[in-house]
Image: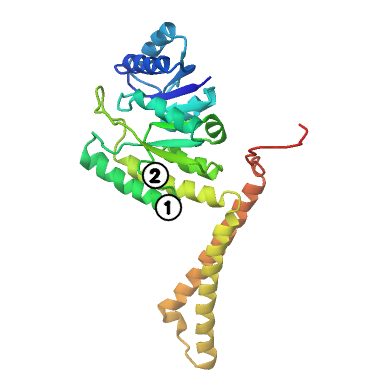
């Protein structure tokens, strides 16, 4: 199969028939073998009834329904697990992503050898105050922290090699950082394409201001896990050593003053308490590192690595 198109959705009953027809038109025009996987993330409207009708009309449409709303990451994870196509393309269900972009995204994966292509909505039709400006700030911070030079990391329109989506686990609200997850999994051929962003035709946005706070916290989490997930002591141990040494030096100097310079009231000096605090923090960081190492070493995935090719190895 050439293509798997994964569409996470929540309360999008009005747009689904038009979206399916548009994708089918593009796929048939380019003679792709394809499947459309619609993942209903606990919609409260008639979205699932619409999907059932589309499945009867087009057997290449497949549906997955959640009992309740779990979030976009969970929907993508289920869709990735079901995808069979050589190239997997994700897009939102609100018709703001254009299926006409599919052929170019497909070629970038198949012909240019890229592992992942992220869309860039260079010209947006969203509210500048609530979406455009915060999005630019968020993407700038994400580029600085992750090192990935993508202008629109959270764009829903992306293309992947099938092995990429089978190698990463999208959970929580990590759908914003799938390129980062792919990078940490060893897929470094990541490209970007300017894509059309269309004005919303039906419904309203499902995301509020809280996504910016959650997005920043998830960015810190994924950066830490990617760099120190299998060696947490390197992170906590380094911080603990620095903190402990600072506290030890402070108390050593104060002890010298008390013993040799006859400065007896060192306990009245704020730096005395700061030194004790740094010792305590250093010790706690060490203990945190040891506990994290114990958890990591007993994890079932502690020796899980992605092997790209093998030669002369008997299974």
Residue 158, image x, y percentages: 42, 32
Q: Pick out the residue farthest to the bottom.
A: 261
Residue 305, image x, y percentages: 64, 42
* In-front residue for pair 6/121: 121
* In-front residue for pair 29/214: 29
Residue located 31% across and 15% down the image = 18
| Count of marks, rendered view | 2
| Left or right of 99 in this view: 147 | right
| Left or right of 260 in this view: 314 | right
Residue located 26% across and 41% down the image = 132
Residue 289: numbered disc: none
Label 2 secondary element? loop
Residue 178 in view of the camera:
yes
| Left or right of 237 in this view: 154 | left
Front tag of 1 and 2: 2
* In-front residue for pair 97/217: 97
| Left or right of 220 in this view: 204 | left
Residue located 38% across and 43% down the image = 215
* In-front residue for pair 190/267: 190
Residue 8, image x, y percentages: 41, 25
Label 1 secondary element? helix
Q: Which residue is mark 1?
A: 145
Sequence-first disc among 1 and 2: 1
- State whether residue 84 is above or below residue 300: above
Q: Which residue is mark 2?
A: 150
Q: Are marks 1 and 2 in contact (CB under 8 Å)?
A: no
Rate crowding at label 2 as few (under 14), some (14 to 19) or many (20 or more) other CA atoms within 10 Å.
many
- State whether residue 64 is above or below residue 254: above
| Quadrant of the snapshot with the C terminus | top right
């Amino acid at each position: 199969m050439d293509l798997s198109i994964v569409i996470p959705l929540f309360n999008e009953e009005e747009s689904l028939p038009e979206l399916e027809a548009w994708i089918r038109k593009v796929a048939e025009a380019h003679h792709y073998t394809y499947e459309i996987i619609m993942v209903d993330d606990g919609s409260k409207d008639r979205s699932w009834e619409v999907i059932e009708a589309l499945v009867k009309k087009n057997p290449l449409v497949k549906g997955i329904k959640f009992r309740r709303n779990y979030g976009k990451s969970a929907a993508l994870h289920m869709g990735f697990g079901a995808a069979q196509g050589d190239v997997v393309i994700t897009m939102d269900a609100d018709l703001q992503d254009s299926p006409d972009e599919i052929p170019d995204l497909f070629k970038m994966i198949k012909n240019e050898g890229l592992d992942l292509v992220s869309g860039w909505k260079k010209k947006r039709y969203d509210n500048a105050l609530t979406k455009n400006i915060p999005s630019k700030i968020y993407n700038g911070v994400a580029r600085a922290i992750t090192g990935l030079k993508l202008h629109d990391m959270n764009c829903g329109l992306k293309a992947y090699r099938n092995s990429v989506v089978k190698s990463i686990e999208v959970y929580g609200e990590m759908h914003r950082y799938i390129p980062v997850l792919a990078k940490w999994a060893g897929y470094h051929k990541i490209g970007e394409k300017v894509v059309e962003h269309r004005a919303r035709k039906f419904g309203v946005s499902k995301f509020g201001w809280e996504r910016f706070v959650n997005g920043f916290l998830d960015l810190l989490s994924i950066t830490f896990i990617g760099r120190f997930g299998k060696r947490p002591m390197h992170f906590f141990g380094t911080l603990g050593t620095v903190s402990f040494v600072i506290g030890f030096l402070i108390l050593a100097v104060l002890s010298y003053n008390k013993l040799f310079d006859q400065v007896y009231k060192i306990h009245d000096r704020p730096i005395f308490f700061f030194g004790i605090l740094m010792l305590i923090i250093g010790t706690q960081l060490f203990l945190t590192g040891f506990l994290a190492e114990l958890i990591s070493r007993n994890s079932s995935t502690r020796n899980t690595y992605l092997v790209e090719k093998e030669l002369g190895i008997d299974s």
